[in-house]
Image (cartoon, rainbow, N blue to C red):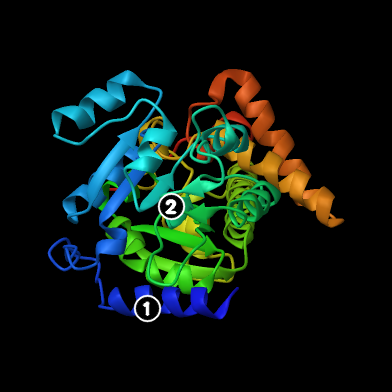
Amino acid sequence: MKISRLRSLLSLAKCNSQTFPSTTAARTFSSTNHHLQNVGFIGLGNMGSRMANNLIKAGFNLTVHDKNNDALEMFSQMGVPTKKTPYEVSEASDVVITMLPSSAHVIDVYTGPNGLLHGGKLIRPWLLIDSSTIDPQTSRNLSATISNYILKEKKGDMEMPVKLDAPVSGSIIAAEAGTLTFMVGGSEEAFIAAKPLFLSMGKSTIYCGGAGSGSAAKICNNLALAVSMLGISEALALGQSLGVSASTLTNIFNCSSARCWSSDAYNPVPGLMEGVPSSKDYNGGFASKLMAKYLNLAVESAKLAGCKYPLTSQAQKIYTELCNGGHDSKDFSCAFRHFYAGMDEPLDK
């Protein structure tokens, strides 16, 4: 990175260095932070629409795009400018955030007809943030491509745009509440400068390393979550078959070495815990089809890295089987019932 570019990014970071705690009042965005004020948001699905709404609440000026006209209409009725193409969003924004379903969608939004990079080698936004969950190689390739572009208007001493991959951990509920965790790869100086954006949509941000590192961290996190949930589900179902209730085993797990998020915060046994998908016939939460998608990404990443992946492979097979069996929209904890044939247990009042 050129010295002038580094200095400019650090200047942006200093301008935005105030603390943004996880409260709505404290997150209100100051209009003096003009390098972040005009934000484009592309991808207004279940997660993206809520993230965009939190940016609006924080005082950012948003311009949005989505292929779904109903989603655009919802924001239009809120007085938010809508655009027909990603390129039009780019032309109206200093920063553009994308939240899209797959690597193919991200590539199309960036490099397709009327994409963000449509205008030759010149681009208006100085910062491009992709919060989609995609493979690390695609993230790295896009970052390399963007490094060849030039800003239409210099931002301080900056002449070239930068890109961050910043996938999130957290459900739709977390997106609504603004309590997501961002795993960020790319320039550390750009990460620091962009913190006010992240902390308007989430409770924490973690810098993971260079380009693609955020995407890699997200894949590893979801892999660990899938294996953890399957391990807890398998143990609880086995315990039931051996005459030990899931309630008793959960109590043991949660005060011993088996304790984990899948046992003490997101238990898969219907009847053991209120407010989680297992208590609502596995509706809501994190769909099995999404877990299958992320496990597919993990398998491909492991192959490219030359790593062994026996647990990833087995988890991939289980979630693929659940999806093929008609449970694709059910929360991923449904493996307890629909793969392991575990039994419901009444909730003690």
User: Cα distance, mark 2 to mark 1?
Assistant: 19 Å
The N terminus sits in image quarter: bottom right
Q: Position of residue 208 (x, y in %)?
A: 57, 69
Task: Look at label 2 and name its amino acid.
Answer: Lys
Q: Is residue 55 left or right of residue 100?
A: left
Q: Residue placed at 25% from the left, 44% from the top? A: 62
| Between 56 and 293, the one nearer to me in the picture | 56
Q: Is residue 20 above or below residue 72?
A: below
Q: Which residue is mark 2?
A: 152
Q: Secondary structure at mark 2?
A: loop
Q: Secondary structure at mark 1?
A: helix
Res 15 quadrant in image = bottom left
* Contact, mark 2 vs mark 1 (Cβ under 8 Å): no
Q: Which residue is mark 1?
A: 11
Going from N to C along the chain, the mark reached first, 2 or 1, is 1
Q: Is residue 105 above or below residue 99?
A: above
Q: Is residue 238 left or right of residue 190?
A: right
Q: Position of residue 223 (x, y in %)?
A: 64, 52
- How would you rate the neighbour count of disc 1 (Cα within 10 Å): few for under 14, some for 14-19, many for 20 or more? some
Depth-wise, is mark 2 or mark 1 nearer the camera? 2
| Between 118 and 202, the one nearer to me in the picture | 118
Whether residue 317 is visible, yes or no, is yes
Q: Is residue 185 left or right of residue 202?
A: right
Q: Mark number for residue 132? A: none
